[in-house]
Amino acid sequence: MSFNTFGHLFRVTTFGESHGVAVGCVVDGCPPRIPLDRNDIQPYLDKRRPGQSRFTTQRREPDEVRILSGVLEDDSTGAQVTTGTPITLVIDNVDQRSKDYSDIKNLYRPGHADFTYDVKYGLRDYRGGGRASARETAARVAAGAIARKVLPGMTVRGALVQMGPHKIDRAQWDWDEVERNAFFAPDAQAAGFFADYLDGVRKAGSSIGAVIEVVAEGVPAGLGAPVYGKLDADLAAGLMGINAVKGVEIGDGFAVAALSGEENGDEIRMGNDGRPRFLSNHAGGILGGISTGQPIVARFVVKPTSSILTPRRTVDRYGRDSEIVTKGRHDPCVGIRAVPIGEAMVACVLADHYLRQRGQIGDAPAWPFAPPAG
Amino acid sequence: MSFNTFGHLFRVTTFGESHGVAVGCVVDGCPPRIPLDRNDIQPYLDKRRPGQSRFTTQRREPDEVRILSGVLEDDSTGAQVTTGTPITLVIDNVDQRSKDYSDIKNLYRPGHADFTYDVKYGLRDYRGGGRASARETAARVAAGAIARKVLPGMTVRGALVQMGPHKIDRAQWDWDEVERNAFFAPDAQAAGFFADYLDGVRKAGSSIGAVIEVVAEGVPAGLGAPVYGKLDADLAAGLMGINAVKGVEIGDGFAVAALSGEENGDEIRMGNDGRPRFLSNHAGGILGGISTGQPIVARFVVKPTSSILTPRRTVDRYGRDSEIVTKGRHDPCVGIRAVPIGEAMVACVLADHYLRQRGQIGDAPAWPFAPPAG
Amino acid sequence: MSFNTFGHLFRVTTFGESHGVAVGCVVDGCPPRIPLDRNDIQPYLDKRRPGQSRFTTQRREPDEVRILSGVLEDDSTGAQVTTGTPITLVIDNVDQRSKDYSDIKNLYRPGHADFTYDVKYGLRDYRGGGRASARETAARVAAGAIARKVLPGMTVRGALVQMGPHKIDRAQWDWDEVERNAFFAPDAQAAGFFADYLDGVRKAGSSIGAVIEVVAEGVPAGLGAPVYGKLDADLAAGLMGINAVKGVEIGDGFAVAALSGEENGDEIRMGNDGRPRFLSNHAGGILGGISTGQPIVARFVVKPTSSILTPRRTVDRYGRDSEIVTKGRHDPCVGIRAVPIGEAMVACVLADHYLRQRGQIGDAPAWPFAPPAG
Amino acid sequence: MSFNTFGHLFRVTTFGESHGVAVGCVVDGCPPRIPLDRNDIQPYLDKRRPGQSRFTTQRREPDEVRILSGVLEDDSTGAQVTTGTPITLVIDNVDQRSKDYSDIKNLYRPGHADFTYDVKYGLRDYRGGGRASARETAARVAAGAIARKVLPGMTVRGALVQMGPHKIDRAQWDWDEVERNAFFAPDAQAAGFFADYLDGVRKAGSSIGAVIEVVAEGVPAGLGAPVYGKLDADLAAGLMGINAVKGVEIGDGFAVAALSGEENGDEIRMGNDGRPRFLSNHAGGILGGISTGQPIVARFVVKPTSSILTPRRTVDRYGRDSEIVTKGRHDPCVGIRAVPIGEAMVACVLADHYLRQRGQIGDAPAWPFAPPAG
């Protein structure tokens, strides 16, 4: 696997920089005959798009996706469908202002990839972070829209569950509310609080971290593997592969450290539908690296934007001590826009495992198994 | 990439089940001419080996590693060295007691992979967890011993930093202490407390979770990539790929949610050695997916063993409600033995990225760069 | 993909050197619940085994395969089946005579990998060719035996069709004859001729090349891809990946250069079974990289053994002009034993593509399609 | 590896159909700081471009390449250089005439991928062959132009050496001549003959096959691996991965069947430059899967275009016997335009192995080695 590709059978390769011509992706391995046109993709891009509230960067990008390959009009239905060949999606960059970055061209912003880029590659694209820009994530969101169509019956939704030290009230969780506020928060009261809180952060020229939760429902039991290719391992890589993410949890996550075996293990009873009914979901829908049929629950933490107005001590690329202030256009809480990105990564990982499972196993015998005779 | 292989240039494929003939691994892509004999590997296996204190499973396995391929005696020195071809390591299973498991053969232990295995594969190896057994991790530890020799000057060490709700005191951190107690705890006082605490858990037939921290020093700046192949994404996959792990963090991890940009971004000054000196390490040694040259800091949480003496509600493979009690031989805190496993996974990921960096980039121009003339 | 692994879903990693402890492989991704024990594998190894006639090397290896992992006794049937986890096969090396090689330890045999090994790795395993030995192919043959069981109804058979300048008479092709002679030749008369011819070569201390043809029947239409992952591209890589192979052809192969479009394109009529009936098979069962349902036909050429008794000019590892005579135990026509190896590689590639097809596509609509209404 | 990606460290993913919006590729893993602008790529596309003589399809495509990502202007030099991130190249489709294909929309052309596409994917892009079109190869040629810049000092050149049954005279080989005739033939006299010969074929509405030879010079010794990842195995896959290719040879290729060990093994003497001097190159520059430092010589055969004017028997997608005549715009000898494509594939494979070698081995000790003391 290369550095800019993820997935094994449902494979996504992304490309593009913040201030280049375009960002985009090639999705290879998508099953054929899935209805797909740009209207299936655009709504997710719109959700991620910057400049939609005062709480996100004011860069104005229409983020209109074009499909360059991999689809065909089906004669019998007139609908556009996938052909099974690589699907290429391109999103042009429109509102670059590279000049904004000329002051920091030779300086390393603390908390940013500036130094590491330079020392690795021997050069860096200083304009808006280059490849490390949040702009790259538009391509993932577009790929995720395709992934959602691969696994039949799957729903993937995300929500912001913590901003700064402030957590939402889980008792108030309402998925409909997520669409109503600028923070993708599932708790209306918390959303109100976040508005004031983040205004304060923003006006101070500062930034703050956040925690995002993604829930996938309708995922069949049996996806994943016991080791390495564990479903949770691939989810962890996918979510940690998003810029600025510093931690990933499945189910109860770090809280399991304090749980006893009795508290942690989800008990089981037979459901009326002939499927097992777990009496709780501490496992987050994954046991031994394989999906249980319960909702998959993953969380990840996004660090505060490193581009802030406060002067910081740093060095330049010539090894000289210096100070830096980052002006540009930035998100005070970049975690907000990470919600659709996290959804996309989870959808892509699940689509991939769905195809891998189908490849290796085909149809397992129907569960529950027939008891042995006698 | 397959389900039982990880790494790209330094590739590890493991095999074997808890109660089969043997466990082991094939390490492909290791550079040639690295001195390597079994004495380089055995100490790490000894550290992971069960039955060394009353706090780990009483299964008695000598865990003696044999090298089947990939090494050769160097005529000029008489030392055994790697040849650059696949290195195969085998560890025989000696102390299987499959009969211990006959009672639970058709039952699904809550919190275990029993149900998911069965529904995925249409069968399961009920003897000791089969492939999902902690026994599989011996192979990773063996591979990790080779990885440590690939990246010159790298040191990878792990410690248990939390058991149940009890955290160590970081002010008391002493790496030497880690070797002295049965918990790999870096805080002598905490270790004493853990002994009493875990005795209580063990006697109650229960189990408890833990958090492990792994620190890699001597890692050069420049390993990793801005997206997907981020060094932290591969560390996350590697650590989440260990059995029973439910969360992974890099640097400050989930705590960054509550940090401001000012608090989170590590400021920089030039060091006397001509390298940048970061004034803190909230980033855990990774910025934008690429190593900074600071210590790499990763943490992961291990859930409590699901095999406990308390009766639990469950179902069997024929869809019948039932109860289960797991007797067998189990770790009351499986997190303890996860310390050398976590170290091994971190070492393997870093060795792999070291080779990938050398492949793509070769030698970057020496940093700091020469200022432009004029 | 690493250097010692091939396949994507059905993945084979081999290990071992000519004069090390053992050779073997790990087969990952095999579907579960396939009956498999060592008796399914051993006959293919016996076919490849050296020392069975005066026409192959006199090294005496029992080549007994052991299964270390990935199988389980199925309670309901008592038969041993695959579990879906990695299957490890080991074949011990028994009859090493490393001393035979001490004379050529520092010398490079013309036509051998001696120089290239040394210049690549900075060392070489001079004992019997190390990793480049034909002995490595035992592991592939073992893996191929598993692959044969993955694709239901598939038969893969090979035959030697040319030795030196002498081709078999295709009009005399009899698959049963292949089992009857020491050359795997499908033409009894040619086999008789080859015996005399090769005796002459052998007594002269010389060696000769050969061409092998492998035919796979029962392969469903639809395996492969239009580009890169073309079924023929993976067959080419697999067959060229065998030691000493210098060319690969599909169907009419190099002869198509001289064909017109009319001669080359296989015409089609509907068969009585509702499948297309191709009126010829110039394509060798593959069109546009995808199987047609006709027999897959692949051919490859094996160069003459480079270890011969005639003195040759060469250099040593210290850069000194020298002469070399290779004594050791060698095959006068190493192409003979390449027959079961070629079969194994073809079987592995087809098993892999079968799983990949099932992963990406699942069930395509039944062909022929229903005509549009109206 | 996916179906539309090749390479391991230098990775090429291509996309696009004959009659879609565009074709193109993403090149991932390219080293940074390599000067690259579109003028480095365009000449190779111009060479492959159709419509340049009466001997290739009359489709008129400017084939102008655009670079969407992965490059940056280097401040110090003003030159555009690679950044080490994915390089995306797009070539718009301009001269599609999809209507040309409406007659054959439901019919399967003998020798074409029409049937296999339909049976695999359940649909096919009938317009110009879709993904299986020769148009896809423009993307490879563009990628190859980048690959050429990765391996310093490497030259990759191809030539047509056979058309129909007619071979060039190797004694007349002149690389300069290749650029002078419409066939990329290295023998002026043969080129003259081919003009008349192919006019005959073209006027008859027929087509003919060809053999192409690609030679890479300046390739260092040591690239490749002993098995599977053999340099020749990857060359075979790359060349067989080109549309219409049915066979691949390295060095003497199929002719080695008739050679003795004495004739085949290239003898060695020390050269004046301190490198080994091979006295012949039957091996085609590769021994044991690893480059020798001699020129790499590979050949491949391209079948005659299947789209011909002669009526052929076939079936349609509804399972009805039928007849077909293909009008469209086609190459009477598609092998001609395969010359720059073959060069590109060889360049990409070599660039990839160069990076892989650097990754695994870094610097091997200088050859020849110092003799042991004493």
Image (cartoon, coloured by chain):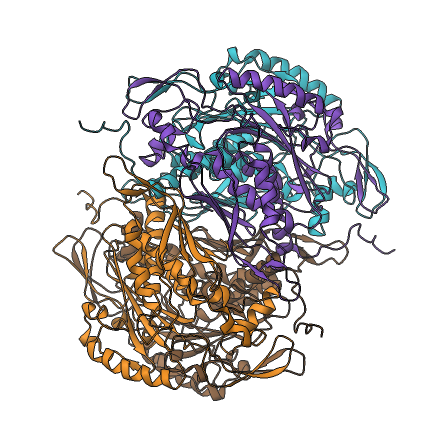
Chain colours: A orange, B brown, C cyan, D purple
Q: Residue at x 55, y 39 (%)?
A: D238
Is residue C136 visible in the rendered structure shown here? no
Coordinates of residue D242 in the picture (x, y in percent): 52, 35
Residue at the outermost left position:
A272
Is residue C236 visible in the rendered structure shown here? yes
Q: From this view, report whether residue B59 is shown above or below residue B187.
A: above
Q: Is residue D24 left or right of residue D263?
A: left
Comparing C242 with C368, the one in front is: C368
Q: Quadrant of residue D111?
A: top left
Q: Quadrant of residue A300?
A: bottom left
Comparing D135 with B277, the one in front is: D135
Coordinates of residue B308 in the picture (x, y in percent): 29, 68
Q: From this view, report whether residue C312 is shown above or below residue B326.
A: above
Q: From this view, report whether residue B296 is shown above or below residue C190.
A: below
Coordinates of residue A259 in the picture (x, y in percent): 30, 75
Q: Residue at x 22, y 45 (%)?
A: A366
